[in-house]
Amino acid sequence: MDPLRVGVLAYPGCFASEVYGVPDLLAMAAHVAAAQAAPAVHEVTVLSPRRRVVAAAGPVLDVSAVRPVDVLIVPGFELSPAVDLDATLARLGPEVAAIRALTAAGTAVVSICVGAFLVAEAGLLGGREATTSWLFADRFARRYADVRLRPEKLVVSDRGVTTTAAFSAMYDFALRLIGEQHGPRVARSTARIALVDDARTSQTPYADPALVPAAGEEFSLGVKRWLDRNLAERYDLSALAREFHVSTRTLLRRFGDEAGETPLGYLQTARVRRARHLLETTDRTVARIAADVGYRDPGAFSGVFVRHTGQRPRDYRARFRRRAWRA
């Protein structure tokens, strides 16, 4: 079997762990495959159009010139609300050009986390399904409206281009690649050795809307604060409008313009956020938690919770419980 040539694109400000994460898991898989009499051969090179690359947090990466590879991995970079994304992507023009050139030569491309921004800048995601970090999914969707974004997915492959969710989703991709190359047995054994979860299907249970940078203005932020303080109360649009001295129509219009959703939509998200915290940190029953966040019918609460997290409340608690508290 010819070795699978894997290239990782290093560039200024990229995360070093995302440069080496997939190659490290491939190295583990090679040992597993050899032990199972199924040799796995991978040829990994860290590539860059630059001579010197300093990664996020300061480590200097050893790089080679860009060359033909079978698979190109594009790691993510430091991104925050304060980062000038236009300026960052402009500085990475040589990397965008390298991605575009390798793809034109037949290379399969894989982005890790917000590396999807670079792949999109290269013009590879228009009309394709893709995913990225849930934290920056809205920002990505606004910038690349022609991409069919699937922010709930961990790994999305569409016609030779693969995108992954935040950070550790690089391991979900690596396990998929190992399984395709060497079979599910090698992939499963590698996951066990590395303590990597090989049964995840969605990043939705990990998403926390409270961590998403607020896009709203003063009016919608005031409404959100009021709803946050009254999670357990019955939703009454007319009463909410009176609280802010506007008509219901004006309330819906102003809130929608600023927040991009309805007050009820925000309230449901806030209730689920509070419920997640209670499931993780208390011994309260699901029915009591439902009541605590404003749902008199546990079944209705469960339905809303599943829509927002992809998991039933009991399943979520089993997975994310931090420690037992007495309520």
Image: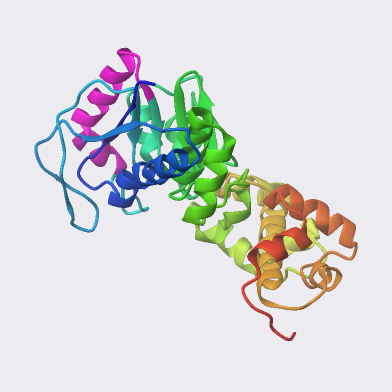
Position of residue 14 measured from the top left corner of the image (x, y, whole percent): 27, 46
Q: Does residue 83 appear to the left or right of 317 in the view shown?
A: left
Q: Does residue 67 appear to the left or right of 159 in the view shown?
A: left
Give the dominant element type of the magenta stretch: helix, strand or loop. Answer: helix
> Can you see residue 129?
no
- Name which residue lies at 78% across and 52% down: 304
Front residue of 47/214: it is: 47
Quadrant showing the N terminus: top left
- Name which residue lies at 73% across and 62% down: 240
Above-or-below relation of 176 to 194: above
Position of residue 92 measured from the top left corner of the image (x, y, whole percent): 22, 35
Above-or-below relation of 45 to 83: above
| Highlighted magenta segment, given as a residue range | 85-108
- Is residue 93 inside the magenta stretch? yes
- Is residue 43 inside the magenta stretch? no
> Can you see residue 153?
yes
User: Total number of numbered labels?
Assistant: 0
Position of residue 249 measured from the top left corner of the image (x, y, whole percent): 72, 47
- Name which residue lies at 47% across and 33% down: 38
Q: Residue furthest top?
A: 105
